[in-house]
Amino acid sequence: MENLELIRSLKIPADTKIVMLVADGIGGLPIEEGGPTELEAASTPNLDHLARKGVCGNSIPIRPGITPGSGPGHLGLFGYDPLKYQIGRGVLEAAGIGFAVGPNDVAVRCNFCTIDAQGRITDRRAGRIPTDQSAPLARRLNQVSIPGVEVFVEPVQEHRFVVVFRGEGLGGDVADTDPQKTGVPPLDPVPANEASERTAEVAIRFVEQARGLLAGEAKANCLSMRGFARRPDLPSYEQVYGLKAAAIAAYPMYKGLASLVGMEIIGKPANLSEEIDVLERAWKDYDFFFVHFKYTDSRGEDGNFEAKVKMIEQFDAVVPRIEALKPNVLIVTGDHSTPAAMASHSWHPVPTLLVGDHCRPDTCQKFGEREALLGGLGHFEALHLMPIAMAHAGRLAKFGA
């Protein structure tokens, strides 16, 4: 029996509340031999307090040794096997800004980038161009015209925007054009199969016209395309878990993923403090809350150890406000590790803690990578976290006689 089918068969109603607090990319590595990770170097009195009250462990986002993207990482946290339910980045971004991806659509998450006179990328994110500067450029690209295909271009945030191609015969299996490094030109969109050949041809024509429309821009004079995707069919949180679920996030992609599993997107917070404001106001209205913090991940991707430490400390500072609401289960985790030492996502397990009714105590005194190795949750695949939370919340019946 598949994991979601099992949970659906065992779910029972209860007057309990679950909070999943996700620090994106929280896991890290030492930058010097024998030194602390970012999480261990940070001053985290509130998370350490939770570690002493609850139970800790390490979650494996996909499978051992597999480095996850943010989409699969979160899908695992939500209890959906990322290998079975694959969601492309483009669909996540489109859903995150409220664009309804239809059955004939292929959505693509795009980055503005900067290229030199030889066409080589000098900045993959166009200097993280501010949204008020990038949004008009994204809308300008709606001038692109491709016979037989409708083209929609919507700004997202900073250097990110979404392109949706709508038409017959468009497949979603096309390779990214971002080479993931500077000093080389963007890659060509290459189809993985015959069904996606037309999509690749459309993408080539889009890029050609878009580069003409961006010519002369100081920063965002080119683009890369990532995560070509069609919309998948996912069972909802209410169907699987019997939970009325809410998502609170500042970044669109995470709103998009939450909406695809049936969570209601609430509030329009711009930062973590405002996210907790939304949580407090909505506390009586939902059973489950997903609260997302982005900047642990982005500072890790920047390779900035000290900045990631500071973001973890900001994250720690809101914990008392959540505790004051008295959730029956509070989870603290990440969707993957993003060590500053690697300046990228990694395959390393993610420190995870759970505080709830009937927690079995372990020996962990702090929240960090080394302590989590000793925790009672052990090493477990992330897709099992929701069943563990449901059990602690009194929302799962006994299996069998």
Image (tube, helix red, strand yellow):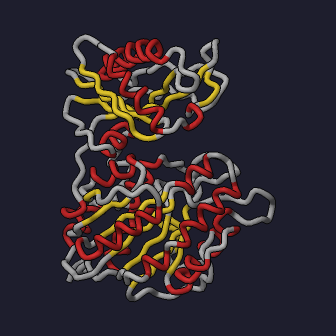
* Vertical arrangement, residue 321 with respect to residue 37, above or below: below
Query: Foreground: 89 or 133?
Result: 133
Q: Nearer the viewer, residue 102 or 395?
A: 102
Asked if residue 49 lies left or right of residue 303, the reply is left
Is the N terminus in the top left, top right, bottom left or bottom right quadrant? bottom left
| Residue at x 73%, y 66% (from the top left corner) | 36
What is the residue that sits farthest to the right in this orientation?
Answer: 33
Residue 85 drawn above or below residue 355: above
Q: Quadrant of the C terminus?
A: bottom left
Q: Is residue 23 above or below residue 173?
A: below
For the point 56% across and 38% down, the residue is 128
Q: In front: 198, or 400?
A: 198
Residue 101 located left or right of residue 30? left
Residue at 39% in and 66% down? 384
Q: Quadrant of residue 189?
A: top left
Marker count (numbered):
0
Is 274 displayed left or right of 353 in the figure?
left
Q: Specify the farthest residue to the front.
A: 132
Say above or below: 349 vs 303. below
Residue appearing at x 67%, y 68% in the figure: 42
Residue 33 x %, y %: 81, 60
Left or right, 159 with reference to 127: left
Residue 31: percent from left, percent from top: 75, 56
Q: In terms of image quadrants, where is residue 121?
A: top right
Expressed as whole percent of the image width and height from the top left, the position of residue 129 reads 53, 35
Q: Nearer the viewer, residue 222 or 217?
A: 217
Q: Position of residue 185 (x, y in %)?
A: 59, 19
